[in-house]
Image (cartoon, grey):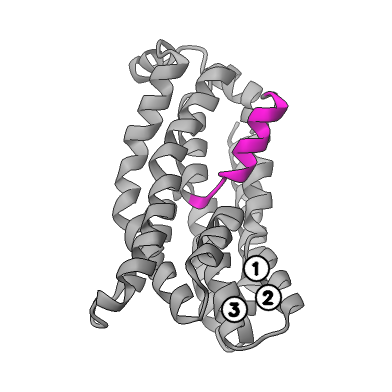
Amino acid sequence: MSAQAEHSAHPRPTPEQSRALQRSPAQCVRHGFLQALSFILVIVPFGMLFGVVAAEAGLDLPEILGFTVLVLAGASQFTAVQLMTDHAPALVVIVSAIAVNLRMAMYSASLVPWLGRAKPRDRAWIAYVLIDQTYALAIQHYEKHPRLSLEQRVGYFLGAVLATCPPWLVATLLGVWLGKAIPEDWALDFAMPITFLALIAPMLRSPAHVAAALVAVVGSLVFAFLPSGLGLFVTAPLAMLTGAGVEVLMERRNRARI
């Protein structure tokens, strides 16, 4: 649903929406920052784990920092490092990392109704810092408060970025410096699944969302035998088609009742 359609669907803002509308862009930055702080609990161990893995793969500090700053995407960074450790060809490493990050294209498309009219420079930095956490927070906030101005939306996104991206870089550094001192029984890899569970759970608000999530879970298990995580690329379109199909059926049923 477009921002304009959402606007018409909420002729009378709730008290919470009214408070959101009264925030200045600077206050929106602070609000986004505070709401994103909880992700530090999973971003820090996740980033430390990448620092440890990258160092063990033979990358030095400048290479790891350059990798993190240029890519800024944990899942694709882990994929690339793992393939590099397995001595995969450079082309395979690059293509695999890009494939893992294709979900960002879907994120970008869904943000167009909310941020598509932003200035080119704003769209540029938003595209760079668009990660799972900033996307999940922003899209939920925009859908909950559809009457926010463009400046308020950009401000909220910036706040979420300031609370998530710098800690990722710092945590990567800590992983490189403290990697050898971290006991092996500290399972830092718990941060990856918990991060995605924390992102997805609040977004399961309709039968279409739940159906897509169930298909994604089942499909991932069924196609787990495929190499290099290819099962996810088979499952993702199946889950999206399922969600779209359920949404169409629900809309038809609602029209039939009218």
Q: Look at mark 2 in the image and give the residue it sits on.
A: 93
Which circle marks residue 32 in the picture? none
In the image, taking residue 212 as reference, residue 50 lies left or right, namely: left
* Amino acid at pointer 2: Val
Q: What residue did someone put label 1 on?
A: 97
Mark 2 lies on a secondary structure that is: helix
Q: Residue 249, position in %: x, y?
A: 63, 50
How far is disc 1 from disc 2 in space, using C-alphas? Answer: 6 Å
Vertical side of 19 occupied by 159: above or below? below
Image quarter (top left, top right, bottom left or bottom right) of the C terminus: top right
Q: Does residue 148 show up magenta in the picture?
A: no
First in sequence, mark 3 or 1: give its number.
1
Of labels 3 and 1, the one closer to you: 1
Vertical placement of residue 136 versus 121, above or below: below
Q: Which residues are magenta?
A: 119-132
Whether residue 224 is visible to the viewer of this picture, yes or no, is yes
Amino acid at pointer 3: Gly
Q: Are marks 1 and 2 in contact (CB under 8 Å)?
A: yes
Q: Are marks 3 and 1 in contact (CB under 8 Å)?
A: no
Within 10 Å of the Cα at label 1, are there few (<14), some (14-19), or many (20+) other Cα atoms? Answer: many
Whole-percent x, y for residue 130 in the image:
57, 45
Q: Nearer the viewer, mark 2 or mark 3?
A: 2
Residue 127 highlighted magenta (yes or no): yes
Counting the numbered discs, the total is 3
